[in-house]
Image: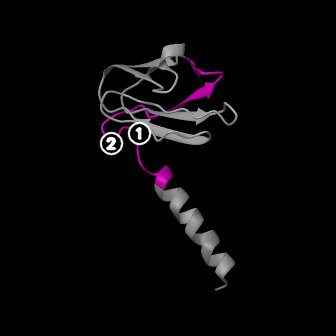
């Protein structure tokens, strides 16, 4: 069998296996989502984001060559001018964060996890 046919067969098998997993097999009927926060013009957009427990938030740097970071109480991204940073929220609550470089300019955000 050619490599192309083997690769195609593997892709179909993997897709079929994933489709066969019933909703709720991992303890929840709702699948986790990914939400986006953009860093632009020295602000987080949106400033407040409401998500469900288990969801991910992905921060995207879109402020040219200006460096920013995403800093929570116990963890933070690296300081960078481009790229992304993703966190999965496994606990309910309100999580406030900021950019240590631009906090005095109001670069703060909040994630509310239900």
Comparing 63 with 35, the one in front is: 63
Give how far across and how far down residue 102 sits, in percent.
52, 22
- Gap in angstroms between the C-alphas marked 2 and 1: 8 Å
Judged from this view, the residue extending furthest toward the bottom is 1
Q: Is residue 76 above or below residue 103?
A: below
Crowd rating for badge 1 (residues with CA inside 10 Å; few <14, some 14–19, many 20+): few
The residue that mark 2 highlights is 26
Left or right, 74 with reference to 107: left
Q: Which residues are magenta?
A: 18-46
Comparing 100 with 71, the one in front is: 100
Q: Is residue 11 above or below residue 44?
A: below
Comparing 32 with 71, the one in front is: 71
Kindly identify the residue that appears in the image at 37 percent across and 28 percent down. 72
Give how far across and how far down residue 104 sits, in percent.
49, 15
The residue that mark 1 highlights is 23
**Is residue 33 one of those drawn in magenta?**
yes
Query: What's the mark number on residue 111?
Result: none
- Give the quarter of the image for residue 114: top left
- Give the quarter of the image for residue 25: top left
Q: Is residue 101 above or below residue 50?
A: below
Kindly identify the residue that appears in the image at 29 percent across and 28 percent down. 91
Kindly identify the residue that appears in the image at 61 percent across and 35 percent down. 61
**Is residue 27 one of those drawn in magenta?**
yes
Crowd rating for badge 2 (residues with CA inside 10 Å; few <14, some 14–19, many 20+): few
Q: Secondary structure at mark 2?
A: loop
**Is there any visible trace of residue 75 in the rendered image?**
yes
Kindly identify the residue that appears in the image at 62 percent across and 73 percent down. 7
Give how far across and how far down residue 49 sits, in percent.
49, 18
């Amino acid at each position: 069998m050619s490599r192309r046919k083997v690769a195609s067969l593997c892709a179909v098998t993997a897709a079929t296996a994933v489709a066969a997993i019933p909703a709720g097999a991992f303890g929840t009927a709702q699948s986790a989502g990914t939400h986006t926060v953009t860093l632009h013009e020295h602000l987080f957009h949106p400033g407040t984001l409401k998500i469900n427990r288990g969801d991910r938030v992905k921060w995207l740097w879109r402020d040219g060559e200006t460096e920013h970071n995403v800093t929570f109480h116990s963890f933070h991204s690296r300081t960078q001018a481009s790229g992304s940073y993703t966190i999965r929220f496994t606990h309910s609550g309100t999580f406030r964060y900021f950019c240590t470089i631009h906090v005095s300019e109001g670069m703060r955000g909040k994630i509310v996890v239900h």
